Image: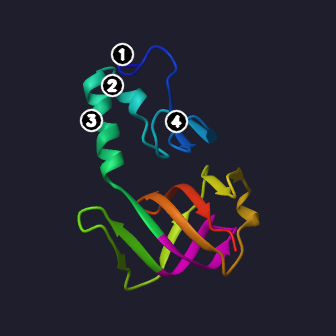
């Protein structure tokens, strides 16, 4: 090896809280916040790691939509009538086409409880925190 990367294990976490003192769920990942990021394999520089994480968080978006289909073969969800949140304009912007999100290693919650991907059904309303097509956290709205 070329002596790059960390000499110990580090974990990156996605936390769902009430904003005060209750944590509903946590998803720990190694080597980065998103799949195949592999930050820890390439650098030991804490500022570079901070930069990678900031870039990842800046590239995340919040999408809401209705489940059209759940594709278990490709582990993705098709959302119709989807909108992305614009923090700059403080408004939801309609997407011209359906949105597809992958749910590999995704934290999924309904009624503040972790559920499984197979619990998501066509017609469910979702809020998805995502990085490109990769869902980081999915909130299933209660009916």
Q: Earlier in the sequence, mark 2 or mark 3?
A: 2
Q: For the residues carrying marks 2 and 1, which lies nearer the camera in this image? A: 2
Q: Earlier in the sequence, mark 2 or mark 1?
A: 1
The residue wearing badge 3 is: 51
Q: For the residues carrying marks 3 and 4, which lies nearer the camera in this image? A: 4
Q: In this picture, is 89 found above or below 51?
A: below
Residue 13: which numbered mark, if any? Answer: 4
C-beta proximity under 8 Å, tags 2 and 4: no
Q: Residues within 10 Å of mark 4 (few under 14, many from 20)?
A: few
C-beta proximity under 8 Å, tags 2 and 3: no
The residue wearing badge 2 is: 43
Residue 8 percent across, percent down from the top left: 49, 15
Q: CA distance from mark 3 to mark 4?
A: 16 Å
Residue under the image location 23 percent in, 63 percent down: 88
Q: CA distance from mark 2 to mark 1?
A: 9 Å
The residue wearing badge 1 is: 3
Q: CA distance from mark 1 to mark 3?
A: 21 Å
Residue 116 percent across, percent down from the top left: 74, 57
Q: CA distance from mark 2 to mark 4?
A: 19 Å
């Amino acid at each position: 090896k070329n002596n790059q990367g960390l000499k110990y294990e580090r974990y990156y976490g996605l936390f769902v809280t009430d904003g005060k003192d209750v944590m509903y769920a946590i998803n720990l990942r190694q080597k980065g916040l998103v799949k195949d990021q592999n930050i820890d394999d390439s650098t030991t520089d804490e500022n570079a790691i901070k930069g990678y994480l900031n870039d990842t968080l800046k590239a995340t978006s919040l999408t809401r939509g209705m489940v059209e289909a759940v594709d278990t073969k490709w582990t993705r969800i098709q959302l119709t009538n989807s909108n992305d949140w614009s923090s700059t304009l403080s408004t939801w912007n309609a997407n011209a086409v359906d949105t597809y999100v992958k749910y590999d290693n995704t934290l999924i919650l309904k009624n503040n409880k972790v559920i499984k991907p197979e619990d998501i059904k066509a017609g469910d309303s979702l809020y998805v925190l995502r990085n490109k097509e990769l869902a980081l956290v999915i909130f299933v709205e209660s009916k």
